[in-house]
Every structure is written in structure tokens, then in C-alpha cells.
Image: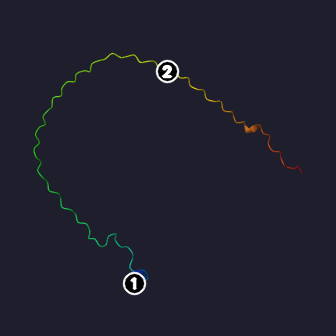
Amino acid sequence: MASGKSFIATLFLVVVLSSMSLRVKGRHILQTTTQPNNFPLLPHFPPLLPLPPLPTYPRLPQPPMPTIPIPKMTPLPSYPRLPQPPMPTIPIPKMPHLPSIPNPSFFSPPPSTSSSP
């Protein structure tokens, strides 16, 4: 079991160190190249070719649509209207009176602190 743990730890260490060295080498390559960095978005794919036109198929003749007779609707029978009972009247409660907030203008202004020379 201990050899399995050490193998996993060693594998992890190798992956970390190799990715670090790849980063350093990649940075070195980027710093030494003088090509402009204007690559196309998809450099590995060939350019899209135009598609050939779709084949045209002959249209089948359309037979005339038969007309469907619509029967006349019979009128609904009229029933006598029953009187409805009157709506009950419920007294609406009055809104409570809210006290008014006093106007702050009745307060006296603070005394002036200016001194006459």
C-alpha cells in the first residue's frame, strides 16, 4: 500500500515539474520569435467551401380541395331569467385619523453668534 502512495506522489511531482518546465520553454519561445501575432481564429481548419445547390424536385399536382358543407347552427333556447337576490350592504369602516406632524417652522431659529465690531 505504501508503494502505491509513493507512486501517486511521484507521478504528481513529475506532472507538476514537467508542466513548469513546459511553461518556461513556452515563455522562452514566445520571447525569441519575431513573427507578428496575427493568426487566424481557426488556423487548423480548411476554409469553408460553398455548398452545391440543392436539387429541385418536381411538385406533385394538387387536387382541388372539396368544400365541406357547414350545417346551420340551431339557436339556443332562451330560458327565463331568475331574479338575483340583492347584494348585502356592508358598512365600510372609516379610516382612523392620523395625527399630523407639526410644522418645524414654528421653532425659533438659533441665536446668532455674530459679534458687532
In this view of the protein, which residue sits in the foreground, 116 or 110? 110
**Sequence-wise, which precedes: disc 2 or disc 1?**
1
Q: Position of residue 86 (x, y in %)?
A: 46, 18
60 in relation to 13, above or below: above
Q: Nearer the viewer, mark 2 or mark 1?
A: 1
Rendered location of residue 101, percent (x, y): 70, 36
- The residue wearing badge 2 is 88
- The amino acid beneath tag 1 is Ser
The answer to whether the residues at label 2 and label 1 have Cβ atoms under 8 Å apart is no
Residue drawn at point x = 23 percent, y = 66 percent: 49
Left or right: residue 92 compared with residue 75: right
Instruction: State whether residue 31 appears in this view.
Output: no
Q: Secondary structure at mark 1?
A: helix
Which one is in front, 90 or 61? 90
Dot 2 crowding, Cα within 10 Å, few <14, some 14–19, many 20+ = few
Compared to 18, does 91 lie above or below? above
Labelled disc at residue 34: none
Report how many numbered discs are placed on residues in the image.
2
Name the residue located 63 percent from the left edge and 30 percent from the top edge. Answer: 96
Q: Position of residue 36 (x, y in %)?
A: 39, 77
Instruction: Report whether residue 83 is seen.
Output: yes
- Residue corresponding to mark 1: 3
Q: Residue furthest right?
A: 117
User: How far apart are labels 2 and 1 at the CA level?
Assistant: 90 Å
Asked if residue 1 is positioned above or below residue 109 in the image, the reply reads below
